[in-house]
Amino acid sequence: MAIYIQKEPFDVSELTSNLIKDNTSIGAVVSFVGYVRDYNYTLTPKKLIQMNLEHYPGMTEKALTKIELNAKLRWGLQSICIVHRIGKLFPSDPIVAVIVASEHRKKAFQACEYIIDFLKTDAPFWKKEISSEDELWVQGRDEDYKRKSSWNLEG
Amino acid sequence: MKINILFFASVREMFNAHKKDVEILDSENSPNKLLYFLSKREGGSWIRLLNEKDSIRVAINQELCNWDDLLNDGDELAFFPPITGG
C-alpha cells in the first residue's frame, strides 16, 4: 500500500508499474484520476483560473491509511496506491489518483470507487477555487455523504 | 489543561492563524464546552466560529470526532470546514 501527498505532478503509468512489480497474482488494475475543471457555477465569473489545495499533515496520512486498510479487508486486494496533490493547481492539472490492483476486475472496480468515495468525506483536504475576481472555498456536497453511506448499506 | 488548537481552510482565515495553544479549565473538557468558554473569554473570531458551528467539523488527535467527545490535557484539537478533496 502506498500513499503520496505531494506538490509535484504524478505519472499514473509509473505508479501502476511500481504497484504491479514482482506480483504475478495481479490480474486487474483499475485507476481513477481526478482533474481540475476550468469552471464552477458558484464562482463569479464562472471561469476558474487557479485552485489552492490545503491539507492537515498527519491526519491526512492516517485517514488514507484507514481507508486503504478497510478496502483491503473488504475485497482482499493485492495492492493500492493513493496520490493527492496539494498547493497551487491549474485547469487540466491532475489532482488525485487511486490505483487498485486485484486478482480479478470486479474487486478492483468496486474498491477503486469505494476509496475515492471515502477520500471525499474522510481525508482532510480543502479546495479553494479562484477566478479573475473571486475566491471561494469549495462547499461540502451532500451527494458525497450519500455515496459514502451507500457503501455501508451494501454491507 | 493545555490544548493545542489547529485551524484549517476557511477557519484558518477566520482566525488569521494556523494554530493557537490555549490554557483552559479542566471542566471545559469537550470541543463544545471549549468553544463556548473561549467565545466568552476571548470573543472575536471565537464568536464567529460559534455562530458557524453547524457547518464546522472537529478532530481530536487527528481523528474526526463529535462536539461532545472528551478532551484531555495536551490534546491536539482541529477546527475546519467540511472536507472537499478528491
Image (spheres, coloured by chain):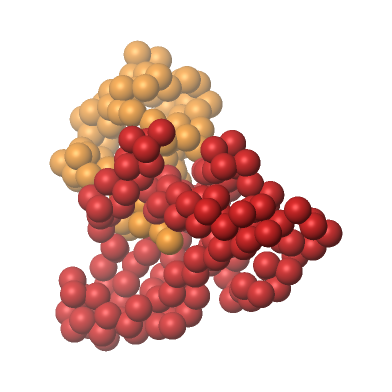
Chain colours: A red, B orange
Foreground residue among B25 and A22: A22
Residue A72 appears in view: yes
Q: Nearer the viewer, residue A142 or B13?
A: A142
- In the rendered view, would you say A95 is above or below B52? below
| Residue A148 to residue A138: above or below | above
| Whether residue A120 is situated above or below residue B67 in the rendered picture | below
Name the residue nearer the viewer: A148 or B45.
A148
Residue B72 percent coordinates (x, y): 47, 20
Please state the horizontal and vertical placement of residue B68, each as a whole percent of the image. 31, 22
Q: Residue furthest right?
A: A22
Residue positioned 44% across, 65% down in the render: A53
Numbered disc total: 0
Which residue is rendered at x = 43% and y = 61% of the image? B86
Q: Please indicate whether residue A150 sits to the left or right of residue A63 in the image.
A: left
Give percent across and percent down for residue B2.
Answer: 48, 26
Q: Which quadrant of the figure has residue A70? A: top right
Counting from the top left corner in percent of width and height, residue A120 is at 39, 53
Q: Residue at x 68, y 67 (%)?
A: A16
Tell me which residue sits at (42%, 27%) in the image: B23
Left or right of A11, for residue B18: left
Q: Is residue B43 visible?
A: no
